[in-house]
Image (tube, rainbow, N blue to C red):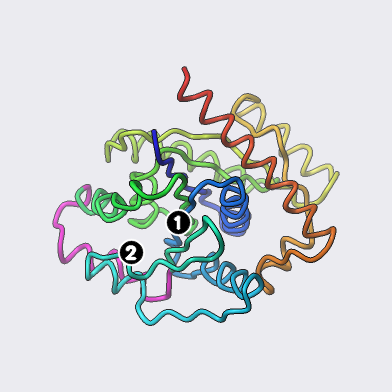
Amino acid sequence: MSCRTITFGNFKGGTGKTSNCTLSGLEFAKRGLKTLLVDLDPQANATNLYLKTKENIDNKVVTFKETLMAAIQDKNLEKITIPIMENLDLLPSAADFSLYPRYMEQIKTNYVDRVHYFDSLLSPFKEKYDIILIDIPPTISLLTDSALYTSDYCVIVLQTQERSLQGAEAFIKYIQEQVIDQFGAPTLEVLGILPVLLKNGAPVDNSTLQTAHEIFGTENIFDITIRNMERIKRYDLTGVTFKDRFDKKVQEVYQEVTKEMIQRWEEIENE
């Protein structure tokens, strides 16, 4: 498999999907893997974070004249791709992407055909990139279905709280019963469940993590746990920075995340 497409998901919002998706993208790029982040969330949080990061890297403020929705209507996504840093590009989202389901109703009568359509748009990118990461909204929608259908793997981001645990359970069930069984996703597999601590060392977090091991099986939980780091929260406002030991600590964590992701897909592909 030359390109691997990975969606980060959970049906509970605010679990850290965007942070983990964007920070993993930076580390894959640093590993020399040609990486594309596709922002399929109309809230465009990943887009905003990456544009601020680009400004931090090369002091360039980027604006884009044409949105993802307009590019889809033109059947040409490549023209809106934004380079963020070496080996890392962004396919940006904007608020009008919320119109995508309505647009698809106009051009495809069958829902399964609508789900499959985005895969055909993304196909040319799979010839150019080693890694494609997709950030999605935390909802059951055509956007989520389209992302999962075109993906080889899904990383489920689990914040250590009950609602996130329930969202992860629902997400895995949905992948199997809908995306694979109903939509016929050709290659989709769960790469693993990535735990994100709400509070370091808190009893509720430890209890939720233990329950996750019991529900999903220890082998399906990432060995690395993302600890609560204030610097990651700050990146939403500042973009990713590369200035001090706190930034370096975050980078070291995501070096481990990407390393384990690679190990996990190698195990799956070598079975």
Vertical arrangement, residue 125 with respect to residue 194, above or below = below
Number of on-image labels: 2
SS at mark 1? loop
Residue 52: % across, % down:
61, 73
For the residues bearing labels 2 and 1, Cβ distance under 8 angstroms: no
Q: Is residue 269 left or right of residue 26?
A: left
Vertical arrangement, residue 270 with respect to residue 108, above or below = above
Out of 181 and 96, give the one closest to the viewer. Answer: 96
Which segment is the magenta one?
93-112
Is residue 109 found inside the magenta-colored segment of the image?
A: yes
Out of 150 and 218, give the one closest to the viewer. Answer: 150
Q: Hey, which quadrant is residue 257 in on the image? A: top right
- The secondary structure that most of the magenta stretch takes on is helix
Q: Is residue 24 left or right of residue 121?
A: right
Q: Which amino acid does label 2 sit on?
A: Glu
Give the alpha-carbon distance from disc 2 to disc 1, as whole Å: 27 Å
Q: Which residue is drawn at 41% across and 38% down?
A: 152
Q: Give the residue at mark 2.
A: 78
Is residue 143 found inside the magenta-colored segment of the image?
A: no
Residue 184: % across, % down:
27, 36
Q: Give the residue at mark 1.
A: 139
Q: Residues within 10 Å of mark 1 (few under 14, many from 20)?
A: some
Q: Which residue is drawn at 33% across and 51% down?
A: 146
Q: Which amino acid does label 1 sit on?
A: Thr
Q: What residue occupies the far top of the structure in this picture?
A: 271
